Amino acid sequence: MADDGISADELQALIARAPAPPQDRRYGLEVERRDGCLIIRPSGTLMQSEPSEFEGRLVDLVGDASARNSVIDLAQVQYMSSAVLGCLVGYLHRIKDHQGQVLLVRPPDKMLRMIEILGLTQIFLVVDDLDTAIAYYRVNPSPAAPP
């Protein structure tokens, strides 16, 4: 029994019932909800062998209430295969089906060139920093979810 009168079993039960932390780091993604936006931060090298896990995690996020105002912060991505980039396009289409939008933030120079060459700047708004992305949604909020 701990000094404050809580047994080890009670402590374990409290820990098990504790709410999840606000950030989720599965599949190389950090997820944060801020100012009505869903901020997704992939990191590292995202290779062609990982798109199914990556895509599955993105699909899980589509139902999140703040997902209609999605921000994908690419600053910590060293490399992203075209297959993984395709997952982002799929996520965008799912979010648009829910009357939302997806902004890309801080893609590294090589990735930005690939996004431009593929013509993805026609479907993604690319901004330089997170504050700009959040400010965009303050001025252009996605409509509320349909009933």
Image: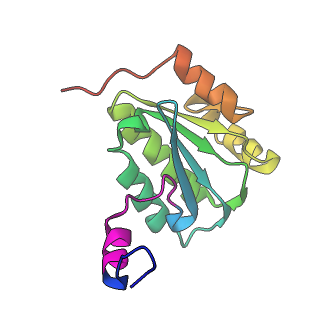
* Residue 95 location (% of width, % of height): 40, 37
Residue drawn at (55%, 59%) of the image:
29
Can the viewer see residue 54? yes
> Which quadrant of the figure has residue 46?
bottom right
- Is 110 magenta? The answer is no
Q: Which residues are magenta?
A: 10-24
- Left or right placement of residue 134 versus residue 76 in this view: left
Asked whether, in this view, residue 90 is left or right of residue 110, the answer is left
| Residue farthest toward the left in the current orientation of the protein | 147
**Magenta residue check for 15:** yes
Q: Quadrant of residue 132?
A: top right
- Outermost residue toward the top? 139
Whether residue 119 appears in this view of the structure is: no
Q: Residue at x 31, y 83 (%)?
A: 9
Q: Nearer the viewer, residue 140 or 117?
A: 140
In-image side of 56 versus 117 (left or right): left
Spot occupied by residue 49 in the image (x, y as percentages of width and height): 54, 73
Q: How many marks?
A: 0
